[in-house]
Image (tube, rainbow, N blue to C red):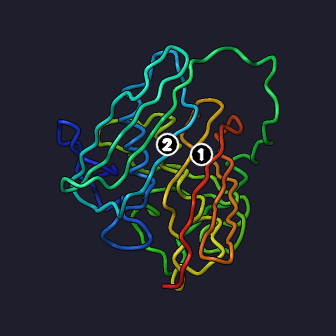
Amino acid sequence: MDAFYEPLGADRFRSTPHTAGPWSADSQHLGPPSALLARQLELTAPASASLGRMTVEVLGPVPIAELTVRSWVARPGRSVQLSHAELSAGGRPVATAAAWWIATSDSTEVAAGLPAPLPPVDSATPGSIPTGWRSGYLQAMEWRSVKGGIGQSGPATVWIRQRVALVDGETPTGLQRLMAVADSGNGVSSRLDLREWFFINTELTVHTWRPPAGEWIGLDANTTIGPQGLGVATSTLHDQDGPVGHGSQALLVRPR
C-alpha cells in the first residue's frame, strides 16, 4: 500500500511497513505518528486559526501495528485554543501531542526576523540511503541534499518529499507533511554512527509562523551533543516559498 497508514474506521489505523524507523524493524520512525497526531489535532482546529506550536511527547516505541488516535479541546478560546491528542497501541498510549491554535490576522506590515530561504529544490542533489540505515520510512521519502545529509556527520540542509500518502485515499495537508519531516532533524544532522550510537529523541516541538504549502519540506538542521548523554537537534523548517518555522528535539545519546 502506498501510504503510511490504512484507515480502519473509528479513529483506528493499520501501520504499513513504510513507517519503519532506523532503530528497529518493529518500531516506527516518529515522522508518520507525528503527522497522524497532527491530522487528528486538525479536526479540533478553529476555522480562523493556524498552528502556533505542536509538541509530540514520545512515551515509548511506536510499534508497526494497529493504532488508535483521539483528540480533544483542553482550553477553548476565540484568540487561542489548546488541543490534545493521544496515540495508542494495544490499549497503551505510545505518544501524546499538544497544539496551540492561534487566531490569524494580517501582520505583513511588521513581519521581521525570518531566516533566509533555502536554495531551490532543483539545485539540490538527489540523496540515497547509506549502509547501516534501515529502509521503510527512509525509502518512503524522497531526499535531496543542499549540504550534508543522512550518513554524513554534522549540520545538514536537505529537501524532503513524501512518496506515499499519510492515510490511504487522502492527500496530506501542509501541516501533516511538515510533521512527517520535522522529526528527521536529528537524523540528517547526526554527528554519530548509527551502528555504534543511539541518538533517539524523546520529544518533537515545532513552532510555525505561517502554514506550510506544497509537497517539499526543507530542513536546515544541526545537532548539539553535550558531555552527559544529552543532545538537542534544531531545525529551521521551510517550504518552497521560504521559511515556515522551527523544530527541536531533545536527544538521548548513548553507545549501542
Corner quadrant of residue 207:
top right
Q: Residue at x 63, y 52 (%)?
A: 159
Which amino acid type corresponds to the residue marked 1 in the rendered image?
Ile
Q: Residue at x 69, y 48 (%)?
A: 236
Disc 1 + disc 2, Cβ < 8 Å: yes
Answer left or right for 204 relative to 73: right
Give residue 217's mark.
1
Task: Measuring from the top left, give residue 120's x and y in whole percent.
Answer: 72, 46
Corner quadrant of residue 241:
top right
Task: Measuring from the top left, give residue 204's x and y in whole percent.
Answer: 52, 52
Answer left or right for 62 relative to 47: left
Answer left or right for 168 relative to 127: left
Task: Measuring from the top left, give residue 80's x and y in whole percent.
Answer: 53, 22
Residue linked to disc 2: 177
Tag 2 secondary structure: helix
Q: Residue at x 56, y 68 (%)?
A: 128
Answer left or right for 45 relative to 219: left
Tag 1 secondary structure: strand
Give residue 141's mark.
none
Q: 10 Å neighbourhood of mark 2: few (<14), some, or many (≥20)?
A: many
Q: Answer above or below: position of 26 versus 211.
A: below
Q: CA distance from mark 1 to mark 2?
A: 7 Å
**Which one is earlier in the sequence, the residue at label 1 or at label 2?**
2
Q: Answer above or below: position of 83 versus 186.
A: above
Task: Measuring from the top left, give residue 185's x and y in whole percent.
Answer: 60, 58
Corner quadrant of residue 231:
bottom right
Query: How many numbered discs sit on the rendered protein?
Result: 2
